Image (tube, grey):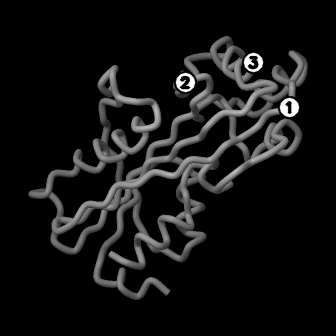
Amino acid sequence: MLDNLKKYNIVLASKSPRRQELLKGIGVDFTILTKEVDESYPSRLPSIDVAPFLSLKKAKAFQDAELPDNYMVITADTVVIVDNEILGKPKDRDDAVRMINELSGKAHKVVTGVTVHTKEKTKTFSVVSKVTFEILDSQEISYYIDNYKPYDKAGAYGVQEWIGYCGVSNVEGSYFNVMGLPTQKLYKVLKEF
């Protein structure tokens, strides 16, 4: 599978252990190399376009001049959108509580943008999943935040953790997209690269 990728040294530009696990899960061998990237975006950019915009920005941080010919860089960015507001990573515990309170009892979108970049070709795409939360009380929210410390996650939650088991009533679309990498779509793109 993915024999067409054997000519590349593949780099995953992400510190996320979930993305690393998911990329391994589709059978890709890779190394990790990250760069600090300013994650700002134009204020008029529609919220649905922010994740692919940021994934492309992360890929372009790898200058073609510094990339050997046989390198492929994969970058990703995930945003949570509720009531047209983007929830990024929480700044602190109070911010995490605020975010989960906003998600409680509602449906929201999770958008992951992915860019696959080589010297010859760049492909950016995004996948949208809809996640519905049950109403969570303050004790449940505190339990989750204090035990799982979701400060490195968009929207202050990881669907693969306790809150996903007990608080998420429905996922429409790719579950793995909600975790941070739309594996089925990425596999298809890599197959055609």
Which secondary structure, mark 3?
A: helix
Q: Is residue 119 left or right of residue 34?
A: left
Is 68 displayed left or right of 188 in the figure?
left
Disc 1 crowd rating (10 Å Cα; few below 14, some 14-19, many 20+) is some
The residue under label 1 is which amino acid type?
Glu
Q: Nearer the viewer, residue 46 or 156?
A: 46
Q: Nearer the viewer, mark 1 or mark 2?
A: 2
Task: Name the disc covering residue 84, or none.
Answer: 2
Measured from the top left, where is residue 126 in percent x and y? 45, 51
Compared to residue 160, the image places residue 149 above or below, namely: above
Q: Residue at x 56, y 73 (%)?
A: 26
The image quadrant where one finds the C terminus is: bottom left
Q: Quadrant of residue 116?
A: bottom left
Q: Compute the Cα span from label 1 to label 2.
A: 19 Å
Q: Nearer the viewer, mark 2 or mark 3?
A: 2
Q: Of the two numbered discs 2 and 3 on the same chain, state the one appearing first in sequence.
A: 2
> What is the secondary structure assignment of the residue under circle 2?
loop
First in residue order: circle 1 vs circle 3: 3
Q: Residue at x 59, y 35 (%)?
A: 153
Q: Give the labeled residue for mark 3.
A: 101
User: Where residue 127 appears, x then y in whole percent?
Assistant: 52, 52
The dot on residue 134 is 1
Residue type at tag 3: Asn
- N-terminal of the pair, mark 1 or mark 2, is 2
- Tell me the CA gap for discs 1 and 3: 11 Å
Q: Residue furthest top?
A: 94
